Image (cartoon, helix red, strand yellow):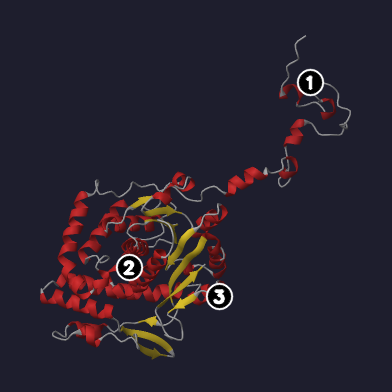
Amino acid sequence: MEPKDFSVEDIENQPLQQIDIDSNNNERPNPNLEESNPNLEELLQVREGEAEEYFPPNEKESEEQEKKVPINEIPVPSFTKMANADIYDQFEKSQKVFKSKVEKFLPNMEDYFITPDNFDLILETLEKRYPKEGETQLLQWKLEDIRQILGKILIPDSVKPTLDNAKVLAQYISEMEGDQVDILELCTGAGISAMMTWKEIKKANPDKRCSIITTDDALQSLLVAETLLSLKGVPVRLVSKQEIQNNSVFGFDGVSLVLSEASDIVNYYALVEKNFSAVISDHGINYFEKDHHHSIVNQIPNLLKKGGVFQVCALENEPKMSLNYKKMALQILSFGKDLSKTIPDAKNPYEIEEVDGLPYVRAINSAESAGLYMLLREDLKNLDIISFGKYLKSIIGVAKVTKKLAKDVKSPISYTASLLEGSKIIPNDKDQKLSIARSLLFVK
């Protein structure tokens, strides 16, 4: 006789004491079950919070769940030279017009400057690529926010700490063995730090492959960075979950843009035990609340290989920015005066004015300020009033956003240093009591 077939319907309303199956798939009484037991339908109605009693978690599955790549797919096409040839041509033509002036007055910015016209070109390009409000939860930056943050690239003083850090890191990379450099950047911003870091490392180490993974939770940030990096000649690509999971990003000699929370990507790489040559964050993780900041910084040593570097740069809450634009205009208009000999003052980097006991920066006494003023003077000599006006507007805009963002720093560099024994602050309080921004360096 063939075994009797049965289904849930056949048994769902019978007491469980009658439900037991022998090896031939036949029902038989089960003496171990009491008549008071519920029927199958009742048993399946597991009360909330009791599921684990019936279905204990599979430890292996839980571990795999934790290792899932914590990034979002980027819902826009890449910005490629082939698809945007006219934009690239327009960008290069404008750059050539300014190149000789930048080489003369701002030699350190030769590889990084963009002209005022190209600043507008990037914003116009971004406006076309931006997702409309409501299309994505990731819409966090308005175009005006980006105008101010990207505008830093027009003001050498604003990006000097970033460039200094990139040069220092490039020297550390030169001392590391091997020809593969893996760097993790937390909080992409406008891509300025990624651009400078990659270029400085390649200049100092042309034979090394440099893979920078930079992550931000704002889609707009990645679109700005991709556009800037691509136009400035840095290999760049938008990265998918698959590429992170199979580690193919580490063979790419360029910058990989990842849509993810900083803490999520840090936790992921700590879990899979990935070691980096460096972890960096430029005006990024110091805006986090202290507990959030602490949780990230606490993982950093685990992410670094021996001799690996951790660099952070952040604005200080004091001094406040309140530039004296009238004095600035008079210096620009002082034709015939060599500002490179009169403005820079290493002992007194700022002109400070105290108001109600609070220090305000009225002028920056740096070689970068002198160079920019002389470049602007050249614009006036050539009657390029439009470029002059755009630069002046950018200086005012960046000063305003710096003043605003300085208030938003929740975890100052001094706090970061307190979490990492052996780290050092640049410049330190003894060397320079007041500084608009400070950096931290930690070597494992």
Visible residue check, residue 71: yes
Residue 91 position by quadrant: bottom left
Q: Residue at x 36, y 69 (%)?
A: 167
Whether residue 19 is situated above or below residue 443 in the rendered picture:
above
Q: Residue at x 62, y 47 (%)?
A: 63
Q: Secondary structure at mark 2?
A: helix
Return the residue found at the far left: 382
* Residue corresponding to mark 2: 148
Q: Residue at x 40, y 74 (%)?
A: 404
The Cα–Cα distance between marks 2 and 3, rounded to whole angstroms, is: 31 Å
The percent coordinates of residue 390 (x first, y second) are: 22, 70
Q: Is residue 258 left or right of residue 22?
A: left
- Amino acid, disc 2: Gln
Which label's residue is closer to the chain start, 1 or 3? 1
* Residue corresponding to mark 3: 418
Whether residue 89 is situated above or below residue 299 in the rendered picture:
above
The percent coordinates of residue 188 (x first, y second) are: 40, 61
The Cα–Cα distance between marks 1 and 3, rounded to whole angstroms, is: 67 Å
Which label's residue is closer to the chain start, 2 or 1? 1
The percent coordinates of residue 406 (x first, y second) are: 42, 75
Q: Secondary structure at mark 1?
A: loop
In the foreground, 177 or 247: 177
Q: Secondary structure at mark 3?
A: helix
* Residue corresponding to mark 1: 23
Q: Residues within 10 Å of mark 1 (few under 14, many from 20)?
A: few
Whether residue 222 is situated above or below residue 103 in the rendered picture:
above
Say which of marks 1 and 3 sits in front. 3
